[in-house]
Image (spheres, rainbow, N blue to C red):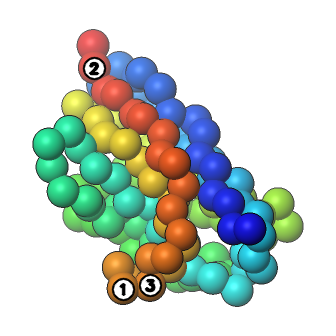
Amino acid sequence: EVQLVESGGGLVQPGGSLRLSCAVSGFTFSNYAMSWVRQAPGKGLEWVSPINGNGGRTRYADSVKGRFTISRDNAKDTLYLQMNSLKPDDTAAYYCVRGWYEYEWDYWGQGTQVTVSS
């Protein structure tokens, strides 16, 4: 059974940092690209960042470029998102998703809430 379990969300002040983790099981993690996707209240899905299977290729949404860093530890079957210089606009539910492009997204985690507020 494929499982993706996010953790690390919470309440943080503007300018603060958080690191999200996504522990996966049920498939060969290193064979798959992974993505972080977020959904702010009342808004649609936003593709935040993908990473390929060996971690050598990444992309970032313009809204997070220079502030967020995606990474993975294939030995630990874990995906990460380091989020720095957080802004209120980063408030959203963050999802770990298997796949790079939207048409590849086939498994999702349950999501972890990030709230940026003073």
The front one of 99 and 48 is 99
Marks 3,2: beta carbons within 8 A: no
Instruction: Report crowding for label 2: few under 14, some 14 to 19, many 20 or more residues within 10 A (C-alpha).
Output: some
Front position in the image: 43 or 100: 43
Confirm or deny contact between disc 3 and disc 1 (CB under 8 A): yes
Residue 91 vertical position relative to residue 32 in the rendered view, above or below: above
Residue 105, given in percent of the width and then of the height, sits at: 44, 77
Of labels 2 and 1, the one closer to you: 1
Q: Amino acid at mark 3?
A: Glu
Q: Which amino acid type is marked by label 1?
A: Tyr
Residue 109 percent location from the top left of the image: 54, 55
Rendering quarter of residue 48: bottom left
**Hey, which quadrant is residue 52 in on the image?**
bottom right
Mark 2 or mark 1: whose residue is earlier in sequence: 1
Q: Which residue is mark 2?
A: 117
CB within 8 Å, label 2 to label 1: no
C-alpha separation, residue under disc 3 versus residue under disc 1: 4 Å
Q: Which residue is mark 3?
A: 104
Q: Secondary structure at mark 1?
A: helix
Image height check: is 115 above or below 101?
above
Residue at point 53%, 69% (across, down): 107
Binning the other alpha carbons within 10 Å of mark 3 as few (below 14), some (14 to 19) or many (20 upward) gives: few
- The percent coordinates of residue 4 (x first, y second) are 63, 58
How far apart, in angstroms, are the residues tagged by discs 2 and 1?
33 Å
The residue drawn where x is 18% and y is 56% is 44
Q: Quadrant of residue 8?
A: top right
